[in-house]
Amino acid sequence: MAAGKFAVMAWLEKNPAAARYIRHLSGDDNYAAPRALFLVFKWLVKQPGWASENGMGEVEYVLWKQGRMATDHDRAELENLLLDFCNQEIEGTKNYKLKFYNVLHGLLKYHKVQLPNSDISEIKADTPPIEANLSMDEIRRIVDNCKFREKAIFSLIFQGIMDSERFTIVNHGWRLLEPQLKDGREWITFRFEYRKKNEHPYFTIWHRDGDAIRFLKEYLKERGTPKVVGTDSRGQPIYEAIFLNRQGQPFNKDNLKQAWITAGTRAGVVERPRPVCKKCGHQMRKTRRYLGAKAGGEKRYECVCGNIEPASQYYEQFHKWRSGKNLHEIRDTVKTMIPNLAGVDRTLVAFFAGHQIDPLDYEKLRDAEKYGLMGKIQEKWSKALPYLNLWRQASDLTTIPTKVADLEDRLNKSNLKILQTEEKVNLLVGFLTSQNIKGTDSATQEFLDRIRKQSNTFTS
């Protein structure tokens, strides 16, 4: 089931009850919720009895009708329809189907309308979940195949154990980062208000000499310093985003996803499927990006038979494809490897990742400065730096073959000079020992005999 961005936005404008619910969601949840709600309601209004007949909007009518239900049996009708939608209309893993199930429940709960909960075992997966298996070396290789912008982005995400939503916050946080980069402090800190189910503030840190900050500074030399574009309600300056896409807009989640897959493909870590031509059955290939009225026009695929069509025509062939090497797997890799490799406390790793480390909120690492713990935290995290600075180590390793080759070249030249010197000595000794010099005294004759004996010993 396809749903264009503009169609979804137009639908939200016609259904303010849904728009209010979307605005209520946090950044983590409202990214996919609009499209999910749109698809649910476009299907629901086609079911008998659920299309508005009195001029009410689609969402408003469903809320009104469900709210008038007097018994649990009647209220279960909508729940049963939702299960049918998830199992019959949506294809994918169970987690993917649950996004549609949860978004409708969230909408009704927000508007104080009752909807029975089913056992989630009733939602059946069509495809098995893909086992994620992104290694530290694969992360290194992918980032190695990026330009300065993406190198800085992905290394900040990697070393800061961030998700995509947290990156978008950092991307608009130049006012907080700039003074820390200028004053030369050893650790750069960035604070977040919350993350998903963790309602408590937390922070993450980067070392000034680490790969992430090094790549960021290199990118800023190319990009320039973010400019002030306005002021907020408190009179504080508002800066443009640190990372901009090709259209000059803030680098967003879709840009992140595409850049990661592209670099992963280039690095040989991700094997992307190629669409099959609808005319001849051969595999097609993406040859170029056609730029239309605006930059970043639609991608197209080309076949050997000459067929050229928009890439969107072929998305249905592989839209369910999963690589197990997605960007969000970075967090799982870091959370798994750093405690085992560096011996860093798992609680500290979980805190930097934005997890709720103590539901009762007795553990207050977020107030480390207040309690004088920041220095200790930084000292502990220093143990992780050798394993987080993948590209600094890789650059050192890449110079080793060159250094070895230089040493071998110098050694070969030295050996050649030694051989040439030995050859000259041998020629001279051979000449002297082959001569019978007349009129020499006994001392000279003894010297020549000694050279002759040494020469015989040397050459034997």
Image (cartoon, rainbow, N blue to C red):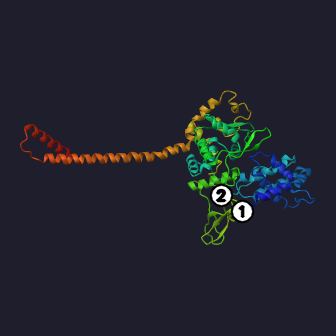
- Residue shown at 40% from the left, 46% from the top: 406
The mark tally for this picture is 2
- For this orientation, the residue located farthest to the left is 439
At label 1, the amino acid type is: Ala
Report whether residue 460 is seen: no
Most foreground residue, 350 or 302: 302
Q: Few, some or many C-alpha atoms within 10 Å of disc 2 (few <14, some 14-19, many ≥20)?
A: few
Q: Residue 278, percent across and down?
A: 66, 70
Q: Which residue is mark 2?
A: 321
- Outermost residue, top side: 372
- In the figure, 22 relative to 190: above or below? below
Provide the residue designation for mark 1.
293
Of callouts 2 and 1, which one flags the residue occurring earlier in the amino acid sequence? 1
Between disc 2 and disc 1, the foreground one is: 1
Q: Is residue 411 left or right of residue 94?
A: left
Q: Judging from the image, what secondary structure is the residue with disc 1 in?
A: loop
**As rendered, which of 242 and 313 lies closer to the eye?**
242
Looking at the picture, which amino acid does disc 2 mark?
A: Trp
Label 2, secondary structure: give it. Answer: loop
- What percent of the width, then of the height, locates residue 152? 62, 46
Image-based side of 458 in relation to 194, left or right: left
Estimate how packed mark 1 is, as few (under 14), some (14 to 19) or many (20 or more) residues with alpha carbons within 10 Å: few
Considering depth in this image, is 84 or 299 the residue closer to the camera?
Answer: 299
Looking at the image, which residue sits at the far right? 54
**Residue 280 in view in this figure:** yes
Q: Are marks 2 and 1 in contact (CB under 8 Å)?
A: no
Query: Residue 325 at what x, y percent from top left?
Result: 62, 51
CA distance for labels 2 and 1? 31 Å
